[in-house]
Image (cartoon, rainbow, N blue to C red):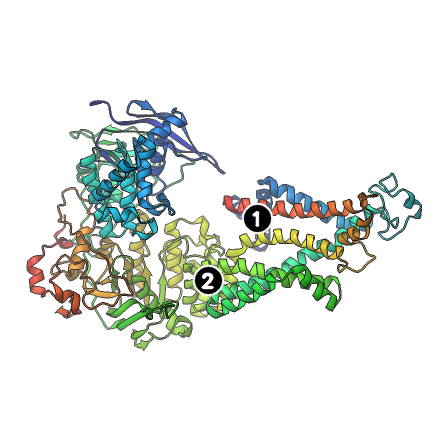
């Protein structure tokens, strides 16, 4: 077993039967994985990453078929194995962890029973022994009080805890291969960091090989030894993490790296370069390179005539790339254009500002049947912020911190409980959107998060934008077409798209249409609630650039809500870090991303996955419970999880707001000078460049 | 998407192109319906019945109320009367054909009425929620908790039995069921981001309900309307059987069973024939509903 790889996939071909006919999704893919090794598969959605994973365990479903190639695992050919033998391998020798932990756990069984089932069915172990192993395993995935967790049902656990349970279930049988399909995608950045560290640690302890599928290069770096980049069902480049990140040879790899926002990039120094176009359908496969149509280095004839075979990069063992021009391309460096650096927009008068903004939700029933009145739920407490014309204000924080509620109150979908919002000098905090005049409504428009729900599936693109023009500008129904075309062009879409329904559009196109719709009233303020978090990095870069460009040309203020600090670093002029409905830190982006940090900002920054194998950052893990939103808070909301907690004063006294500069403030008991002494910079300033 | 492009290439004027596109869309829908066997069979049964009802004046061998006294001695199926005659010597085939006409008008009209009323109530209840929702749902529950047959008897006895009154009664009693379905979907759909976007541009509540929400609830609604048309066929039969259906002597499937079920032991065909007619039509609507649901799930 020393020489033979644990898993060897050779010339794998997978075909899906669809209405459009037979689609060769994987045209012939080979990979191998040694025992104990971790291989990452990276690519945009629709590249066949998950199909590879599902083919290995033969879970393709009714539409998919393996039409060729071999999959050899521990010396056995899996493609021809019978169902009974497959069952013996699945779960026991090969375990899988999927993206949504709630879908992997049975909601009507306790976590303990589900864990115990694994050794009981696969190894015929008795209940007592299985229980002992389950408890030990829960300890290994670092869940506090394993015996108590055993008795819980999945819905009683947080998303991060659920994913730990799923990982425990996968590892309890001691599998030789663990397949993880986007295991951290739905999780908050702090939770993601903890889960990735856990996977890395367990991997070394259990000697399991890992096939790690992700669209996030940063998380791949944390877990894997080797990386394979997939495009249209083929591995276009493969090598060690270091080889891929320091010397990427394939234009696709370079494209992905160029469009990835990192903590060291901002819009003024190193603009993102999106990959043009989108993943093409697998139906009509070209004769030559599959990436040719999107490739900036394509050479007609050479690239498009023959299938491209993978070759080994000179002087780099194990680094293979499928590109005929791989040797000719200059060495890749991260784009950094100091000369092109633009001046920051001068801060002017605030266009939109919140003053002591508070939002509470009354519980459904004011009074429990017995006992005291239920306290209201606090969503926002005493929020103060302002955004100037032409500036981007980013609001960051984990899920549940009140970011989206803030967006809703600013936009009038919800009304403030106390405090106020001024929009261009007009007090609108108490005005719901139906109560706002048309002039006020057109001043502020929103872009939403979910591309699948932001457009009405029953209406055409043209109707959606035209209706906005009509409502916000009072255009007559007759002269909408020209305006619709102009707006579609403004977001770089073809005016012909106006006749389409949203289901014919890709996620990025839908989000562009949503932006066009928001622009219909020529707003002064655009509130964008996680507008790019559901998009692939390549598409995300294009949409971010679009927002930037529109802001520059139209002079609108952008309120950008995000959980992704790299995107925020790139896009924002000012940042508000929120925790539990309160602002922990507020200031210009370069100040917020440099010490002294609020301890929460520090933890968030340390958790961001950095796509750089040389990056050594001390990670700050947040432990301790998040207080419930209806608990009365005596002191600092972050005190229960704060790694720099001083003592009782944090629990009892609300933190003072320290003004470090005119527009930089931190809500913390620790004096700023002390914070500065304790903290190392976590982010290199973009101007330094790498 | 190939069709519109082809149309554009042909250089047809825009309104004609739009009409052609609409036609192509319908053809595509019809073909999609053929992809589901239950839908195809169900639609086939319904189309046959509709055809027979339309053509009844032309193809029915006798007038529906004409008595053939000679046939009274032998009312069973014969060369002259393919399905036999009833106890008054009226040709059953002719009566069945003519009897299809009121059913096929009343049942769908009543469903349309119920869908219109129910959608409005459901949208209002779901969109506003709170006490508005409670009032509407509870009112609907009260109607639904009544034994419907007794309710029909009371209302029709009071207002008299006519086609319009039957449609009214069916609309009233079926609307709460549709309202319940629409309310459920509205509660889900009103949280969609496109509804928030509509609010942001200042749309009225009525616009949001009718233009933003209702079209996205149409899938399950159409399936349910199909099922409910089938149920209405049964109820119209029951009303006829109870003697509160359409006034005699014009043929009505339920009434035909009522008039003849006493002779079940001797001449079962007299009541079995209208029963079979009712069943086949109900099966047709149910199959279409099953097929539509299947197609809806597939996309």
Point out the image quarter for the N terminus of chain A.
top left
- Determine which quarter of the picture holds residue A50: top left
Residue at image coords 79%, 60%: B247
Q: Mark on residue A199?
A: none
Which residue is labeled 2 in the image?
A466
Image-based side of A190 in relation to B96, left or right: left
Q: Residues within 10 Å of mark 1 (few under 14, many from 20)?
A: some
**Residue A517 appears anywhere in the view:** yes
Q: Chain of mark 2?
A: A
Q: Can you name the residue that lies furthest to the right here?
A: B70
**Residue A479 appears anywhere in the view:** no
Secondary structure of residue under mark 1: helix
Q: Chain of mark 1?
A: B
Q: CA distance from mark 1 to mark 2?
A: 23 Å
Give x and y (percent) for residue A583. Answer: 22, 66
- Front in this rendered view, residue B252 or A535: B252
Give x and y (percent) for residue B70. Answer: 93, 45
- Front in this rendered view, residue A280 or A42: A42
Which residue is labeled 1 in the image?
B25
Image-based side of A476 in relation to B236, left or right: left
Give x and y (percent) for residue A125. Answer: 30, 32
Mark 1 or 2, closer to the camera: 1
| Residues at circles 1 and 2 in contact by the CB criterion of under 8 Å | no
């Amino acid at each position: 077993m020393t020489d033979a790889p644990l898993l060897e996939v050779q010339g794998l071909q997978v075909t899906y039967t669809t209405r459009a006919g037979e689609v060769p999704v994987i045209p012939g893919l080979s990979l191998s994985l040694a025992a104990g090794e971790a291989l990452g598969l990276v690519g945009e959605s629709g590249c066949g990453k998950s199909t590879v994973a599902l083919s290995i365990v033969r879970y393709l479903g009714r539409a998919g078929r393996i039409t060729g190639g071999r999959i050899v695992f521990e010396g056995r050919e899996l493609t021809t194995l019978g169902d009974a033998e497959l069952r013996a391998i699945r779960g026991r020798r090969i375990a899988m962890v999927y993206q949504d932990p709630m879908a992997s756990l049975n909601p009507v069984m306790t976590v303990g029973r589900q864990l115990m089932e694994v050794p009981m069915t696969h190894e015929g172990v008795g209940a007592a022994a299985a229980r002992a192993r389950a408890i030990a395993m829960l300890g290994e995935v670092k869940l506090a009080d394993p015996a108590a967790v055993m008795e819980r049902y999945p819905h009683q656990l947080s998303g991060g805890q659920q994913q730990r349970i799923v990982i425990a279930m996968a590892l309890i049988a001691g599998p030789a291969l663990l397949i993880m399909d986007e295991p951290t995608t739905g999780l908050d950045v702090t939770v993601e960091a903890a889960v990735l560290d856990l996977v890395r640690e367990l991997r070394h302890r259990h000697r399991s090989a890992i096939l790690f599928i992700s669209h996030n290069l940063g998380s791949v770096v944390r877990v894997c030894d080797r990386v394979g980049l997939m495009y249209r069902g083929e591995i276009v480049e493969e090598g060690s993490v270091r080889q891929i990140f320091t010397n990427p040879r394939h234009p696709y790899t370079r494209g992905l790296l160029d469009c990835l926002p990192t903590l060291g990039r901002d819009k003024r120094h190193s603009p993102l370069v999106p990959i043009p176009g989108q993943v093409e359908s697998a139906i009509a496969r070209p004769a030559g390179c599959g990436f040719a149509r999107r490739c900036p280095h394509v050479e007609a004839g050479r690239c498009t005539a023959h299938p491209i075979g993978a070759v080994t990069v000179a002087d780099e063992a194990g680094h293979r790339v499928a590109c005929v021009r791989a040797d000719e391309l200059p060495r890749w460096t991260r784009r950094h254009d100091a000369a092109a650096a633009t001046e920051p927009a001068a801060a002017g008068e605030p266009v939109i500002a919140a003053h002591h903004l508070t939002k509470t939700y009354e519980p459904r029933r004011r009074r429990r049947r017995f006992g005291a009145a239920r306290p209201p739920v606090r969503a926002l407490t005493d929020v103060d912020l302002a955004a100037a014309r032409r500036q981007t204000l980013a609001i960051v924080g984990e899920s549940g911190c009140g970011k989206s509620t803030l967006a809703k109150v600013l936009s009038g979908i919800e009304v403030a409980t106390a405090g106020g919002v001024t929009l261009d000098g007009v007090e609108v905090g108490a005005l719901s959107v139906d109560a706002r005049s048309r002039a006020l409504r057109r001043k502020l428009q929103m872009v939403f998060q979910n591309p699948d729900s932001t457009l009405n599936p029953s209406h055409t693109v043209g109707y959606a934008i035209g209706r906005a023009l009509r409502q916000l500008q009072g255009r007559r129904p007759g002269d909408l077409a020209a305006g619709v075309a102009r707006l579609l062009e403004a977001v770089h879409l073809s005016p012909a798209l106006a006749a389409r329904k949203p289901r014919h559009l890709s996620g990025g196109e839908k989000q562009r249409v949503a932006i066009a719709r928001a622009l219909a009233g020529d707003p002064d303020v655009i509130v964008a609630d996680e507008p790019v978090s559901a998009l692939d990095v390549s598409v995300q870069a294009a949409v971010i650039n679009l927002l930037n460009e529109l802001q520059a040309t139209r002079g609108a203020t952008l309120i950008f809500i995000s959980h992704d600090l790299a995107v925020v670093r790139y896009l924002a002029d000012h940042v508000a870090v929120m925790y539990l409905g309160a602002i922990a830190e507020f200031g210009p982006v370069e100040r917020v991303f440099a010490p002294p940090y609020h301890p929460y900002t520090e933890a968030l920054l340390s958790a961001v996955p950095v796509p750089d194998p040389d990056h050594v950052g001390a990670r700050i893990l947040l432990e301790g419970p998040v207080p419930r939103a209806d608990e009365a808070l005596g002191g600092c909301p972050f005190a229960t999880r704060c790694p720099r907690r001083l003592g009782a004063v944090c629990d009892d006294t609300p933190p003072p707001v320290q003004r470090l500069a005119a527009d930089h403030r931190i809500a913390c008991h620790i004096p700023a000078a002390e914070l500065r002494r304790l903290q190392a910079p976590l982010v290199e300033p973009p101007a330094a460049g790498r | 998407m190939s069709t519109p492009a082809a149309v554009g290439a042909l250089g047809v004027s825009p309104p004609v192109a739009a009409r052609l596109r609409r036609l192509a869309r319908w053809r595509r829908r019809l073909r999609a319906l053929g992809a589901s066997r239950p839908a195809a069979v169900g639609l086939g049964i319904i189309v046959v019945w509709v055809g027979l009802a339309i053509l009844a004046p032309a193809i029915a061998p006798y007038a529906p109320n004409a008595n053939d006294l000679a046939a009274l001695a032998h009312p069973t199926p014969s060369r002259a009367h393919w399905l036999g005659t009833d106890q008054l010597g009226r040709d059953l085939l002719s009566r069945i054909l003519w009897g299809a006409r009121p059913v096929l008008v009343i049942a769908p009209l009543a469903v349309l009425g119920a869908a219109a009323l129910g959608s409005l109530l459901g949208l209002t209840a779901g969109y506003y929620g709170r006490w508005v929702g409670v009032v509407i749902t509870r009112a609907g529950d009260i109607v639904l908790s009544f034994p419907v047959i007794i309710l029909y008897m009371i209302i029709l006895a009071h207002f008299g039995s006519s086609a319009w009154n039957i449609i009214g009664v069916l609309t009233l009693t079926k609307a709460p069921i549709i309202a319940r379905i629409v309310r459920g979907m509205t509660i889900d759909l009103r949280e969609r981001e496109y509804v928030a976007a509509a609010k942001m541009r200042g749309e009225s509540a009525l616009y949001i309900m009718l233009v933003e929400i209702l079209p996205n609830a149409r899938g399950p609604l159409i399936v349910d309307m199909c099922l409910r048309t089938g149920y209405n066929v049964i109820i119209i039969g029951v009303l006829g059987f109870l003697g509160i259906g359409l006034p005699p002597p014009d043929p009505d499937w339920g009434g035909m069973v009522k008039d003849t079920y006493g002779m079940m032991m001797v001449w079962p065909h007299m009541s079995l024939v209208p029963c079979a007619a009712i069943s086949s039509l109900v099966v047709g609507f149910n199959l279409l509903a099953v097929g539509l649901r299947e197609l809806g799930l597939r996309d």
